[in-house]
Image (spheres, rainbow, N blue to C red):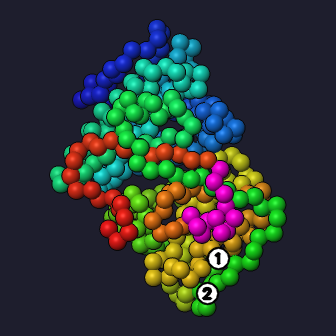
Amino acid sequence: MSAETRQAWTHPLPSEWAVRPPTTRDVDGVVAMMNARTQAFYGENQSTPHDVEIWWTSPRFELENDVRLILDSRGSVAGLVSVDNPGPPYARVECSAVVHPKYAGLADAWDGLYAWGLGRARELVPLASPEIRVVAECTAVAQDGARRAALERAEFAPVRVANHMGIGLSSSVPPARWPSGVSVRTANVEEDLRAIASLLLEAWRDHWGFIARPFDQVLADWREGIEADGERFDPTLWFLAVEGDEVVGMSLCNSHIADDATRGYVQGLGVRPAWRKRGIALALLHHTFAEFQRRGYAGVELDMDSQNLTGALRVYERAGLRVLRQSVSYEKELRPGTDLATRELGA
């Protein structure tokens, strides 16, 4: 059964508008639409053709089945909805819709995108074990009233707020102070990736909303991401805190934010629970900031849960990071059952 037959479009659109799956020829139009939104909210571009190509060629992504574009009467991209196959245990499916700012007030566009996306998300529910609760998830910038209203019409509920934080590097950075026996080095990806994946699963298991995934899948996803990033991946910005031969903390960084090479991004920061409260996270941040400053960067940014269960916000603020903006996470239950997500410490 074709994707069009399986999941039809259900909401009216203006005359001469069209809905269809994308092709590789749509990359530039999608980038232009997405950047129009980030320019409207942040005053900057956050998408590049390379980013979209990586997204659309990821192993579990099916371009024909997982994305729909809305095209206006001139054939320009007016909106997009995508559904990401999360892999096992299939407990949370990302369902994200975007509408060009000039059409943000067109409720039927938003509602049609979310209706289609939820229909596609429900097709993935049987992949989860029968006892598992399955939700659709989406995020919205806090000030994006049109998107948040559409999510509420689709009966998504707000569940969490995330902070996007940053620090300028114009002034001196405090030196990293490592506890006795702990030092820092850069990662050797081939030798360290298994230890990094293991640390990720252990360090983030007590973060709100964390859902455990099979180790081999986590490892494969990281390998695929590194390969897809190509020459942009810089392993000298992956910093590991080690005690002897054991990796006990990490600060995994990107050398760019979209196409802006003046700001670095901390993609993953974590410390194994047994090594927490010894100053390792703060030392990793100071080490990270100092290295970006040495390379001439203007600032460093990261994203984190505003109500992080481990108290990370206090560490980030001590390091000098400040909240630049916030986004809201929404969920819609697709099937009741046992909730696999961490909701409190020790869960």
Query: Can you see residue 244?
Result: yes
Q: Quadrant of the N terminus?
A: top left
Which image quadrant: the C terminus? bottom left
- In the image, 10 versus 326, the foreground residue is 326
Whole-percent x, y for residue 30 in the image: 56, 31
Residue 251 appears in which quarter of the rendering? bottom right
In the displayed image of the protein, which residue is found farthest to the top?
15
Q: Which residue is mark 2?
A: 179
Labels 1 and 2 touching (C-beta < 8 A): yes
Check disc 2 and give the amino acid type. Answer: Pro
Residue at 59 percent of width and 26 percent of height: 101
On screen, residue 6 above or below 16: below
Q: Secondary structure at mark 2?
A: loop
Q: Residue at x 34, y 53 (%)?
A: 87
Q: Residue 18: x percent and y percent?
A: 45, 17
State whether residue 99 is above or below residue 285. Answer: above
Residue range of the region highlighted in magenta in the rendering: 313-324
